[in-house]
Amino acid sequence: KQYLRLTSAPDPNTVRPEEVLKESLKMLKRKWKDNPDYHYTCEQLKSIRQDLTVQRIRNRFTAEVYETHARIALEKSDMPEYNQCQSQLKVLYEEGVPGNISEFTAYRILYYVFRNLSTDLADMMADVCLDSQRSQDPAIAHALQVRKAVAQGNYRQFFRLYLDSPNMGGYLMDLFVD
């Protein structure tokens, strides 16, 4: 289904139920692996997100859609789309929706470091440091080490961490390098 920005109330006949959206996401992931057409994939993911939003579906599947879209946007260096997904994921996680919280917390730390968003980073650090289990997560621990290396101007350590970046953190670290 093509993504169209809503300018009026959605037509219930065109909104796909969650089970159909799950199948759409599976198909879209397969298509992405076979033929990574970013424009098409992004439009389809926006369309899935829109159908979830108008139905007020906020569950693990919703998080999976936003996580998938964020990862693909990262891979293609589409920071506005990544930020939109990351912002929504932050809200979903705060509401208790399960997902890959540690992975995306690590990405958020790296992004705050890259953008030099010291207030946001300080708030994030306080939250992470209060939860010793979260701060021990390998992706979060890595992001905190990157923050430290950047703060100290330790480029040697930064590039060591860059080469050993977990998940898709390297895509965010590319922003530092470019």
Image (tube, rainbow, N blue to C red):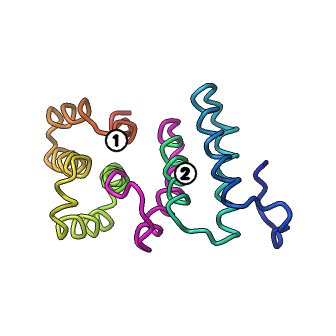
Q: Are marks 2 and 1 in contact (CB under 8 Å)?
A: no
Above or below 140: residue 157: above
Query: Which residue sits at x=55%, y=47%?
Result: 69
- Where, by quadrant of the figure, is residue 41 drawn? top right
Give me the C-alpha separation between circle 2 and circle 1: 17 Å
Tell me the amino acid under the disc marked 2.
Pro
Q: Which disc is residue 80 wearing? A: 2
Q: Is residue 156 left or right of residue 76?
A: left
Would you name the residue on which mark 1 appears?
Answer: 169
Q: Is residue 70 left or right of residue 170?
A: right
What secondary structure prevails in the magenta region?
A: helix
Place of residue 108 in the rendered image (x, y in percent of width and height, measured from the top left): 36, 55
Label 2 Cα neighbours within 10 Å, binned few <14 / some 14-19 / many ≥20:
few
Tell me the amino acid under the disc marked 1.
Gly
First to last magenta residue range? 74-103
Place of residue 29 in the rendered image (x, y in percent of width and height, measured from the top left): 59, 38
Taking depth in this image into account, of 131 and 77 the one nearest to the observer is: 131
Place of residue 55 in the rendered image (x, y in percent of width and height, measured from the top left): 69, 70
Whether 81 is among the magenta residues is: yes
- Where, by quadrant of the figure, is residue 52 drawn? bottom right
Whether 84 is among the magenta residues is: yes
Q: Please, what secondary structure does the residue beneath circle 2 have?
A: helix
**Label tally:** 2
Query: Which residue sits at x=16%, y=43%?
Result: 153
Q: Which disc is residue 129 wearing? A: none
Pick out the residue farthest to the top.
34
Query: Which residue sits at x=68%, y=46%?
Result: 24
Label 1 Cα neighbours within 10 Å, binned few <14 / some 14-19 / many ≥20:
many
